[in-house]
Image: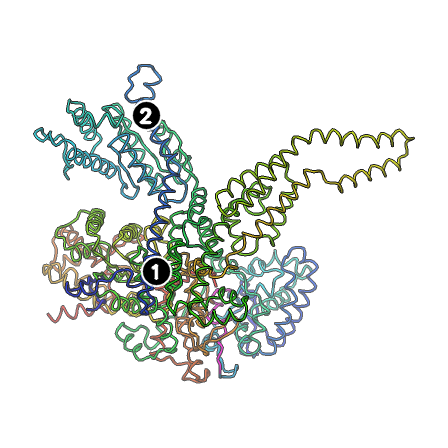
Amino acid sequence: MSSQKQPKEGRVLEVRFVGDEEVLQHIVDKQEGVKGKNAVQILVSLKTPRKSEPEDSEDEDHEVCNEQDYVEALGTAAQASELARTPGKSVKFTTADSPPEEVTSPTRASKRQSTQYKTPSKGKKNQFVSTTPHRLRKRLSAPNLRSDSDSDFSPSNSEEELEAEEEASKLVPESKPASKAPAAGLYKTPVKKAKKVPEPSLVEEYFEAHSSSKVLTSDRTLQKLQTPQLDQDTLCRLLDGTSTAFSAELKQLNKEHERLFHKWMLQLQLGFNIVLFGLGSKRTLLEKFRTSMLLGSIHVVINGFFPSITIRSILNSITEEVLEHEGHFRNPLDQMDFIVKTLKEDPDLQLFLLIHNIDGQMLRGDKTQQILGQLAAIPNLHLIASIDHINAPLSWDQFKMSQFNWLWYETTTYQPYIEETSYENSLLVKQSGALALSSLTHVMRSLTPNARGIFRLLAEFQLENKDNPSYTGLSFQDFYQRCREAFLVNSDITLRTQLTEFRDHKLIRTKKGADGVEYLIIPIETGTLSDFLEKEDKE
Amino acid sequence: MTTSSVSKGCFVFKPSSKKKKTTSLKASDYFHDGKADSQNSESRFETCQSLWQRMKAETERVQEDLNTNILDSLLEFARKSTASFQSKTDDWASRMRASEIPTAALVLGVNVPDHAMTFQSLSALLQESVTPYVVCLQSKECSALKQVLQKVLVQLMGHSVCVEDDDDEEDQSGPRPTGIPSRKMLCSMATLCGWYTAVTQKSASPSPGKKRLSSSKGCGQRPPVVVIFKDLESFTPRVLQEFIVISSQYIQQLPLIFIFGIATSPITIHGMLPHSVSSLLCIQLFQSLSCTQHLATVIDKLVLTTTFPFKLSGKVLQVLISIFLYHDFSVRNFIKGLQLSLLDHFYSQPLSMLCCDKQEARSRAKELSHEDCENIRQLPSFMRYVEKQEPEIQVQLLTCDKRVKDVTQSLLKELHAYHKNYYPVLRCLHALTSSLPKYPLGKQIRELHGICLEKNVWETEEYESAFQLLRMLAKDELVAALRTCTEILKCAKKLGDAVEKLEEFIERFELLDRCSAVVEMGQEGEEELPPQKGLQKKTDLFQLQKSLLERESRRTKKLSKFELLRLAVLDCIDSIVKKHLLPPESQPLHEVFYYSSAGTLRRHLNAAPRTAIQTALNNPYCYLQSEALKSEGGAISNAAPDICIVYKLHLECGRLINLYDWLEAYATVVAAAEGKDPDSAAAAQLDDVKHARFIRAVSELEFLGFIKPTKQKTDHVARLTWGGC
């Protein structure tokens, strides 16, 4: 077929690409070989019981495979990579109505587009070459070791040509099922497949994923899309249009949760605190609880997911707005003591604290949780909170747990986390930089013209180099030179003072280069930066 | 007013004062299920609250009782060390000792939340009877030496001001030697020392009020300063070391006593402090009561008693105990669980208003409403009871409310009587079996109680083997056990006949003792004869063997008097057990007293948030009962919510995930769900909506903590979870 004979001069890669017919033959050979070797291998291998399985599944694979698959399998046999476990490898997505042939596995879709990353999966490989997994792996990664490892396989073989072929024959069956497994799974016998191939145990999976320090995945990036990144506004606009499926069921689910409101109020007043967990945003639920139950009493709503919330602001809003205390506190502990004392003196004052995401990024710290725990332990302060992070309970040790006195309620809502993920902090959303830009202009306005000029110089230089991937920043000496030429500074001390100010405002960052020289960069998106410069120009 | 903003995260809502007055609701207003059923629910709430108050008081009393021993010995220690401070004997040993700081290492166990109460009562007791100067330090307030000193000074000097205000009113004119430490004041040990000498000299000066005070405290004019380190393990070793070294410099002028609260083992002291520091301390070890003993007492006083009508079913008790044993060892949490189950019982069971004392319950039963009667008829246990009655009575029970009320009264009475007998018999059985080898019926009485709650205890194998062992008991042990049994049973009025029977047995055992000597003599004589005869005959090995076997079999067949008596007494006990240790489920109307929804309790006390999230992601059908989501064997419908699909796809990846590939895989799955031909160009093409949905799903996964952005490679994320579902 389409595979060509690789020139042998390379000597580094012994893998040769061979035609289909040959491959078929070799597979048969190999199976026999495996059987023949059993006698020897049984002594060293603990995995012999599995041996009968691969044959069956392989046979099936033969029937369903098409030539295209072969090319891919062969073309990439040499790359051992983890990305073989591309999404969708063995996930089954059942469709109720469409015939199974029409279901496309994601793997297949991606396969069509590129062949460069199709590689055998190690997990699968174990199944098929269970006799010598280690050795084969070695061969795949470091074929030069062949000379010492080959001897047990083919002691009589001295001819390189033959040997290489055998290599190929061994590699082919390994790689093929792996790349084809999803296709087979989807086309033909999904259930059977699932039964036949025992899932590698979770422990094995973990160590496999972490066994090599180098992770190989495909090199494709989101730049290939027409719209690599959406900004928050577009995202919201697009998502507003989508209708939510299962609205009836979701409503039902919500109704069940709402039935608990009375119970929550009761338990809150009897000294328990309530924490909600489960998939889905619990914001609307808590908001509903607030509007239906808490309007008659003093309450504080805290958005724990808010990116710049601090324990101080929480305590301040309690002391200043709830307790109407004027004056400052030296530290949160003092403030805490004050709150405890005041609330103790006035037992009629019932204060409800409603924290969305008590496990929020900014509230995760041990100190913060300690203070929140102390707050929760006050008898006439009632706390109802939600958690979403899977490891959230780890932030509470036994002592804090007893302070919080939680009652857990599972409230799975399946509601999208709209508000919680809306602060441009998620990884796929384009940082439009609206916030950054406005803060930048504000800071700039308070600076002297010279300082503005200095910053501008750096910004322009950075923009000039925006297409240079190895740009590490402008070195201090260069920068000083440029500033001098532009008559912006007269000594490097002036420049350093200026830079310190920039650094305090987080406008620049310094990095030590490999040569020990300081490099300066502006940690702001290029788009935002050019917007900023344009705006400056206009003024 | 909205609660979302890009500039702040805290929103305070204060209702206008007018509104506040009209809508101030108390806890009782939320007690009903949202239904208007006020009268019943109110009385239920009151019953619940009063019952809880009583239970709480009881737990506190138990705690105090348990702590008395250890607290007494600690007080004794404090007094003794004070005395050694004051005795000015001049021998070498006491001078050596004088330079060491007396330290009590108080090992309290890992159940840290329970410690707070112990420390509270300890410091109260110390202040009452040894010294007014007690300082409690917590590790979280003491991250640096400066803070430690500050804390000590503030607590001591602030305290002394209070004392003066109370006691020295006639001493107003004199200048105050101390004041609240100002912010600028230097916090140092020297300051403290100066303050201490000033205070003690002042109290030594002839002021009648003071003299009375100090003499009543019984520690002379130099009361020690006690510093309690509540959680020694969490202190920074460095801070602790420095504090100890500094303190030891001042020990001559300032009689200090340390108390270390230790959760793990006393070895930690030596782990934290090098020898040079620990040699400055004179450590005495105090071991507090273990938490399991504490739990046993609490269960004994709260659960295994007729004092409180509220009862826990076997499953609930098991949940609470396993949370205790496998999670926290915290008695406080156990009591919290008890409180929750009490609350939930009264909240969810409308008939729980009958769950009160006997008299009260009877009068309430007389005034049952029609609805309540209907509720009673619905109870499974009551239905079983009705089925056993004569047909005409059945009809009456099902139609006439008055009849139901009468029967309810008598049934409640029976239930109370049942409990009155149940607990003594349970204790009695426990007394008999708790010392058997391998503890077939459990070492702790709660285990036996658990078995008895679940099923007929005499049908279990454990009971069988326990009685087999009992049948082999020696006389002394058996009689002793029987004695304790009669003691226990005497407490119950209605078990008089059982007590009488057992006492009779004991008497007969004793009688046996007295005449046994005579009988044995006779027996021996009897038995001795024939073999002698046999032996005198000419020896025949076969004959000998035969006669020996014969003797053996005769012996097994013929039981001694003691053995017969033993069997009889055990049969008697067996019959008592069978009569009184019936599981509560067999009793009609048991639902009124027993709280049985163990699942609820476990979900609220011992939840597994991560499992819940992963179940929701893996199997949305669990939560959304839609046919479209039904799927078998680990597969997931492609109509599932986006986040489920994206999660499922991510499970297939290695350590790093390429976002582009992920997106593509997602798009393909969703296209299939929309019924498009996956091979057509339209499906391959990504529209913006799908892209946006993907972005949201990925952001949500990041928010939940399944993935995180990584810089290792462009457009990749790192996977964070392995295993689990």
Q: Are marks 1 and 2 in contact (CB under 8 Å)?
A: no
Which mark is on residue A137? none
In the displayed structure, would residue B603 be above or below residue B436? below
Seen in the image, is B256 located left or right of residue A29? left
Q: Nearer the viewer, mark 1 or mark 2?
A: 1
Give, as a three-letter code, the residue at label 1: Arg
**Residue sitting at 14 percent across and 56 percent down?**
A484
Going by the picture, which residue comes out furthest to the right? B538
Q: Chain of mark 1?
A: B
Q: Is residue B48 left or right of residue B559?
A: left
Q: Which element type, helix, strand or loop, lies under badge 2?
A: helix
Residue B359, position as x, y percentages in the image: 39, 54
Q: Residue B322: x percent and y percent?
A: 47, 52
* Residue at horizontal 27 percent and vertical 41 percent from the top: B142
Measured from the top left, where is residue B321 in percent x and y? 46, 51
**Nearest to the observer: residue B664 or residue A176:** B664
Mark 1 sits on what residue? B44
Specify the quadrant of the image occupied by residue B646.
Answer: bottom left
Question: Residue at the top extreme?
Answer: B91
Judging by the rendered image, the residue that carries numbered circle 2 is: B81
- Which comes sooner in the sequence, label 1 or label 2? 1
Report if residue A92 lies within the magenta region: yes
Identify the image quadrant of residue A44.
Answer: bottom right
Stretch of the chain drawn in magenta = A80-96
Residue at 37% x, 74% y: name it. Answer: A250
Q: Is residue A54 magenta?
A: no
Judging depth in this view, the residue of A11 and A371 nearest the camera is A371
The kind of residue tagged 2 is Ser
Circle 2 Cα neighbour tier, 10 Å, few/some/many (<14 / 14–19 / ≥20): many
The prevailing secondary structure element of the residues shown in magenta is loop
Q: Quadrant of the N terminus of chain B?
A: bottom left
Secondary structure of the residue carrying tag 1 is helix
